[in-house]
Amino acid sequence: MAGGSNLHEVDAGRFYRSGQMGADQLRETIDALGIRTIINLRGARPEAGWYRDEAAVAREKGVRLISLRFDADRLPHRRELVKLLDAFRDAERPILVHCQAGADRSGLASAIYEMEYMGRPKRDALEMLSLRYLHIDWLRPAGRYFIELYQGEPWARNSYHPCNGDYEYYDRDAYCGG
């Protein structure tokens, strides 16, 4: 496969993470790894060429495309986090999760996947947010902060309400109606 996408295997034959790929590299990756689901953490952006290309390749290859809006600088919104957990539970594998660079949002999602589906302890899952994957903690601390807070899927579904708590890296004024 062509380089430059920060593509890594997380769970052999089941889960991969990467940065945004061009159409040709995405086709090649789908074919080589047998990808059945793509989880795009950049959000549905039909006005963007990269998104139109990705959607076209997914249709062409019969791959399900799930688009969620995560931000590398902020904690996830609860509804997006629940949609991610739903996708992990329901999506046909192998899954490819990606953001722009494959460093921050993909690292957060991969850490959650490792804890929930691979039984990895939090301290090990935090490796998904490391320099190995081009993540720089001091530049983008929200992902590591969130994983430190994370208490499992029941917590995420039932107790995580960032608009009702005092969390760092969450703009309550912008996202909670003032």
Image: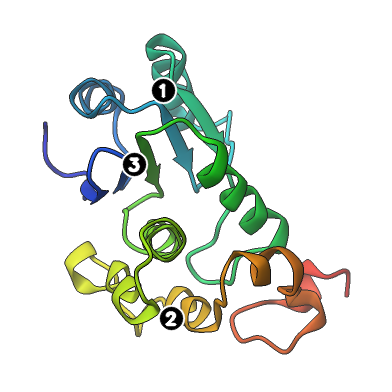
Q: Amino acid at mark 3?
A: Gln
Q: How is the image coloured?
A: rainbow
Q: Along the horizontal axis of the image, is 157 left or right of 6?
A: right
Q: Work out whether residue 94 can be spotted.
A: yes
Q: Work out whether residue 50 can be spotted.
A: no
Is disc 1 in contact with disc 2, using a CB cutoff of under 8 Å? Answer: no
Q: What x and y, as percent, mark residue 178?
A: 88, 75
The tag earlier along the polypeptide, 3 or 2, is 3
**Which residue does the numbered mark 1 point to in the structure image?**
53
Please give the name of the residue rendered at 59% of the width and 71% of the height, measured from the top-left corner: 75
**Which residue does the numbered mark 3 point to in the structure image?**
20
Closer to us: 124 or 23: 124
**CA separation in Å, label 1 and label 2:** 31 Å
Closer to us: 126 or 58: 126
The tag earlier along the polypeptide, 1 or 3, is 3
Q: Residue furthest right?
A: 178
Q: Residue furthest front?
A: 119
Q: What x and y, as percent, mark residue 105?
A: 44, 60
Q: Amino acid at mark 1?
A: Asp
Residue 68's place in the image compared with 152, above or below, is: above
The image quarter in which residue 97 lies: top left
**Secondary structure under badge 1?**
helix
**CA separation in Å, label 3 and label 2:** 21 Å
**Secondary structure under badge 2?**
loop
The tag earlier along the polypeptide, 1 or 2, is 1
Q: Along the horizontal axis of the image, is 62 left or right of 8?
A: right
Q: Along the horizontal axis of the image, is 78 left or right of 106?
A: right
Is disc 3 in contact with disc 2, using a CB cutoff of under 8 Å? Answer: no
Picture disc at residue 141 = 2
